Image (cartoon, rainbow, N blue to C red):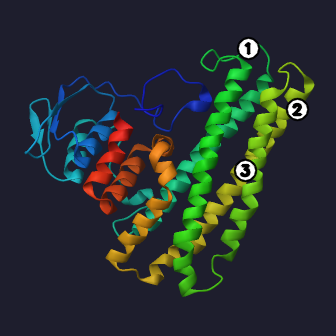
């Protein structure tokens, strides 16, 4: 598993939303299931959030069985998650109606909003990190977990490049799949949202160029300090722009998907098209996406993937995040 679920020393800028939640579970936990099953990988991923010791016993030709202490459970994904949450309440894995999603929420809306939440969390992390860099200004009081100033800038650049790829792919997914459906019902409805995407891209690319410039400056020079302060300011602007844009989409545009009255089959086909266009993110930035979500949000996102992907493709995606 990647950075998001390991219990390791991190700088303040790198802490994930659920890293503040601690678990001291000492109960013996065993999981019996097929190692190639999407269901098995799903439950193995869920158990990572509980910070417990899992004994996975690969089996074939039998349903998944979870043993916690002397108790056994088998059944649907929700049934097993309910059992896990009952045994280890924190952090919760199941979605609640008050969390902003309900049983009747369109699948595509849930996927888009969860991607928004992950983007905002990562942007907020980059802003905190940028502020910290600017405050230290390349001085020798570095964070040992991050290395020298130049090493830290390389890590910062990698994180921002991942976020940039995620944001660009998300915008393309909306433009190619989500917005055209709404445009069929009301031409011009998504014009402003598309224009916002076009305005944001130069800002995002400009920040990437700023980071490249900082990477070659003398860390002790006034120019280096000025560049860090400018970077911090531009990151804050991008965060505010993205928050405003996402809020507008979620409040005004996306709810109108309900009025299009897609059938269940059309919903599934649309959701699969969205995930297909997010192939880059889902192939090598899947951990990155999930890192920006709370546990119940991450599990709901995996539910959406399993609902529209065939067993083999879903299993392949899930296996990557637990390896």
**Tags 2 and 1 in contact by the CB under 8 Å rule?**
no
Say which quadrant the N terminus sits in: top left
Callout 3: SS: helix
Name the residue beneath numbered marker 3: 204
Q: Residues within 10 Å of mark 2 (few under 14, many from 20)?
A: some
Q: Residues within 10 Å of mark 3 (few under 14, many from 20)?
A: some
Q: Which residue is depicted at the point 72% across and 64% down? A: 198
Relative placement, left or right, of 180 versus 69 is right
Name of the residue lying farthest toward the right: 222
Q: Residues within 10 Å of mark 1 (few under 14, many from 20)?
A: few
**Residue 210 appears at what percent x and percent y?**
80, 39
Relative placement, left or right, of 128 versus 285 is right
Q: Which residue is depicted at the point 66% across and 62% down? A: 245
- Give the alpha-carbon distance from disc 3 to disc 1, as whole Å: 29 Å
**Residue 238 appears at what percent x and percent y?**
72, 51
* Residue 93 seen in the current view: no
Relative placement, left or right, of 83 versus 15 is left
Name the residue beneath numbered marker 2: 226
Residue 258 occupies which quadrant of the picture?
bottom left
**Tags 2 and 3 in contact by the CB under 8 Å rule?**
no
Q: Which residue is depicted at the point 23% across and 43% down? A: 36
Q: Which residue is depicted at the point 67% across and 70% down? A: 194
Say which quadrant the C terminus sits in: top left
Relative placement, left or right, of 93 versus 211 is left
Q: Earlier in the sequence, mark 3 or mark 1?
A: 1
Name the residue beneath numbered marker 1: 141
**Residue 80 appears at what percent x and percent y?**
20, 46
Q: Earlier in the sequence, mark 2 or mark 3?
A: 3
- Give the alpha-carbon distance from disc 2 to disc 1, as whole Å: 18 Å
Callout 1: SS: loop
- Give the alpha-carbon distance from disc 2 to disc 3, as whole Å: 19 Å
Question: Which is more toward the observer, 12 or 218?
Answer: 218
């Amino acid at each position: 598993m990647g950075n998001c679920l390991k219990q390791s020393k991190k700088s303040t800028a790198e802490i994930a939303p659920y890293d503040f939640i601690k678990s001291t579970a000492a109960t013996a936990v065993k999981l019996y299931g097929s190692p190639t099953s999407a269901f098995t990988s799903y439950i193995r991923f869920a158990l990572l959030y509980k910070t417990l010791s899992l004994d996975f016993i690969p089996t074939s030709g039998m349903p998944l069985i979870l043993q916690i202490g002397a108790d056994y459970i088998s059944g649907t994904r929700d049934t097993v998650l309910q059992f896990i949450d009952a045994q280890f309440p924190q952090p919760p894995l199941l979605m609640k109606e008050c969390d902003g999603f309900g049983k009747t929420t369109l699948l595509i809306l849930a996927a888009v909003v969860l991607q928004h939440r992950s983007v905002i969390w990562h942007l907020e992390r980059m802003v905190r990190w940028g502020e910290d860099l600017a405050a230290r200004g390349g001085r020798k009081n570095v964070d040992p977990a991050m290395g020298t100033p130049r090493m830290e800038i390389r890590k910062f650049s990698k994180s921002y490049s991942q976020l940039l790829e995620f944001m660009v792919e998300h915008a393309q997914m909306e433009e190619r799949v989500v917005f055209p459906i709404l445009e069929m019902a009301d031409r011009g409805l998504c014009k402003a949202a598309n224009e916002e995407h076009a305005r944001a891209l130069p800002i995002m690319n400009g920040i990437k160029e700023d980071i490249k410039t900082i990477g070659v400056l003398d860390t002790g020079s006034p120019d280096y300090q000025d560049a860090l302060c400018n970077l911090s300011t531009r990151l804050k602007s991008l965060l505010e722009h993205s928050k405003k844009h996402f809020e507008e989409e979620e409040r005004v545009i996306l709810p109108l998907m309900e009025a299009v009255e897609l059938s269940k089959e059309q919903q599934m086909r649309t959701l699969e098209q969205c995930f297909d266009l997010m192939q880059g993110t889902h192939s090598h930035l899947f951990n990155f996406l999930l890192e920006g979500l709370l546990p119940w949000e991450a599990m709901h996102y995996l539910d959406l993937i399993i609902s529209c992907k065939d067993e083999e493709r879903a299993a392949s995606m899930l296996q990557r995040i637990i390896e």
